[in-house]
Image (cartoon, rainbow, N blue to C red):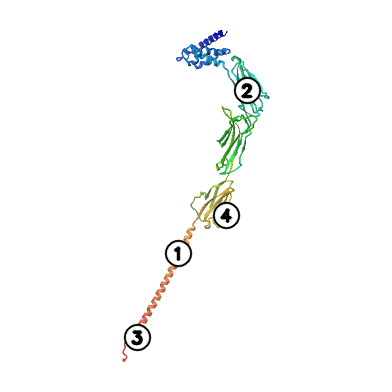
């Protein structure tokens, strides 16, 4: 019986190889056209009940397995027959879970399919799990209205009669999760100091499927996951702690913790939570403008009697308070947060150094401006010139008076000398006269 069956199997294999020999007549390299393989599988399908034929061909023609894919002999045809027959005889089993990851308490659909006709399919769940089952040809579909187990496995077994009752099993572990995601942080943060953002992830089983990611805006800054699968009854949450030093750029910045499950072929987001940071810092970048022009280090010239509007602005959180210090005896002007100091009419006493002081509870920043009154210097020069002219005029008068006085005294002195000389000459003449005369 065994030899007769072998001869029958051999004749069938040779006969089926001849069915596609004609496809190779017009093939210059004697290769099997790829588009003919599905037709071969269809021809071999009726013989799938005798899958031992594959083993028979292997034992009787072992050298066929060492040949290449060139169909140049009967052994080559038989080799391709075995390949095609193997595709027709073997069957597959697969499980489809929808959704691929299920939220605890939500519904789930599990489907087990096979390519084996007239097969026996069985799915055995753990005790206490009762699905709503629908059976179809080569398929079982189970519907669960609410998942109440963290450890949810779908073992599917298929027994195929056409494959000598060969049995295949597939098992799928369903990822079960909740959406309990918590973020803890400091609400008030001062720049330059270290802080941390902590994200506690949701419960997920298997635990190694969960990925926790911190995002700053849309940019990923840190992610973390577990390597161990964990235990279904152990609620040990994954934590992602992001340490950083607060800066001004973090003010009003959105930080998001994103929870995802890795399904192997895709990554599925399951929950997220965000926080907007409030960063506090002292005043900085203080700027002064005079009459809508930003002040540089040089003095600002303003004409006398003109209007002066001095504005001071500064960045800070909490909002800053602006204080002006006037050069006149250090007096101060309290202004609104806009920091505007208005002088309707500039006078000479308004000139000098003005100080804008911006402050909040975290510090102080100052900016100065020098106001120079245009026209005050001209008046001073005019007074100096007037004084110089008066001094010069008085000096000229005094000089003329001195000259007049000196000249007058010099004339009266010369007359007296002449008179004295005339008297003296008369005395000399009287002395020269003889006494006898």
| Mark 4 Cα-neighbour bin, 10 Å: few <14, some 14–19, many ≥20 | some
Mark 4 lies on residue: 332
- In this view, which residue lies farthest toward the right? 128
**Mark in the foreground, 4 or 2:** 2
| Mark 3 Cα-neighbour bin, 10 Å: few <14, some 14–19, many ≥20 | few
Precedes in sequence: disc 4 or disc 1: 4
**Mark in the foreground, 2 or 3:** 2
At mark 4, the secondary structure is strand
Mark 2 lies on residue: 155
Viewer can see residue 409: yes
Mark 3 lies on residue: 427
Residue at screen point 49% across, 12% down: 75
Residue at screen point 42% across, 72% down: 402
Can you tell which quarter of the image residue 437 is in? bottom left
Near-viewer residue (11 or 47): 11
| Mark 2 Cα-neighbour bin, 10 Å: few <14, some 14–19, many ≥20 | some
Distance from label 4 to label 1 (Cα)?
Answer: 40 Å
Can you tell which quarter of the image residue 94 is in? top right
**Mark in the foreground, 2 or 1:** 2
Precedes in sequence: disc 2 or disc 3: 2
Precedes in sequence: disc 3 or disc 4: 4
Mark 1 lies on residue: 388
Return the x and y of residue 344 as percentages of the image width and height. 55, 54
Precedes in sequence: disc 4 or disc 2: 2
Return the x and y of residue 37 as percentages of the image width and height. 52, 16
Viewer can see residue 98: no
Distance from label 2 to label 3 (Cα)?
Answer: 174 Å
At mark 1, the secondary structure is helix
């Amino acid at each position: 019986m065994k030899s007769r069956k072998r001869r029958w199997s051999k004749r069938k294999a040779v006969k089926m190889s001849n069915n596609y020999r004609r496809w190779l007549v017009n093939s210059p390299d004697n290769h099997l056209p790829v588009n003919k393989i599905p037709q071969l599988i269809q021809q071999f399908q009726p013989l799938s009940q005798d899958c031992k034929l594959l083993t028979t061909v292997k034992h009787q023609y072992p050298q066929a397995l060492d040949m290449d894919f060139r169909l140049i002999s009967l052994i080559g045809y038989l080799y391709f027959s075995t390949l095609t027959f193997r595709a027709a005889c073997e069957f597959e089993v697969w499980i489809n879970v929808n959704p691929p990851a299920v939220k605890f308490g939500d519904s789930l659909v599990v489907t087990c399919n096979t390519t084996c006709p007239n097969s026996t399919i069985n799915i055995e769940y753990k005790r206490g799990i009762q699905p709503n089952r629908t059976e179809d040809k080569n398929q079982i579909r189970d519907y669960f209205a609410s998942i109440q187990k963290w450890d949810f496995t779908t073992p599917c077994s298929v027994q195929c009669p056409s494959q000598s009752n060969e049995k295949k099993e597939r098992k799928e572990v369903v990822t079960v999760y909740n959406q309990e995601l918590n973020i803890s942080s400091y609400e008030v943060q001062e720049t330059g100091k270290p802080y941390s953002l902590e994200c506690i992830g949701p419960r997920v089983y298997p635990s190694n499927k969960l990925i926790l990611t911190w995002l700053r805006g849309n940019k990923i800054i840190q992610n973390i996951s577990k390597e161990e699968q964990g235990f279904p009854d152990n609620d040990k949450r994954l934590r992602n702690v992001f340490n950083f030093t607060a800066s001004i750029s973090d003010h009003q910045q959105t930080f998001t913790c994103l929870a995802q499950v890795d399904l192997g072929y895709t990554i599925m987001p399951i929950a997220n939570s965000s926080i907007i940071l409030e960063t506090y810092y002292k005043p900085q970048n203080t700027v002064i403008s005079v009459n809508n022009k930003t002040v540089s280090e040089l003095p600002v010239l303003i004409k006398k009697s003109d209007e002066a509007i001095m504005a001071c602005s500064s960045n800070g959180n909490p909002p800053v308070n602006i204080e002006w210090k006037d050069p006149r005896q250090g007096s101060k002007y309290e202004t609104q947060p806009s920091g505007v100091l208005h002088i309707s009419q500039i006078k000479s006493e308004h000139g000098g150094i003005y100080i804008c002081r911006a402050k909040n509870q975290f510090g102080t920043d100052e900016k100065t401006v020098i106001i120079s009154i245009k026209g005050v210097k001209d008046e001073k020069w005019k007074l100096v010139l007037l004084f110089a002219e008066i001094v010069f005029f008085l000096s000229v008068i005094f000089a003329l008076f001195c000259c007049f006085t000196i000249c007058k005294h010099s004339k009266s002195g010369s007359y007296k000398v002449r008179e004295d000389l005339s008297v003296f000459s008369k005395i000399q003449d009287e002395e020269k006269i003889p006494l006898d005369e």
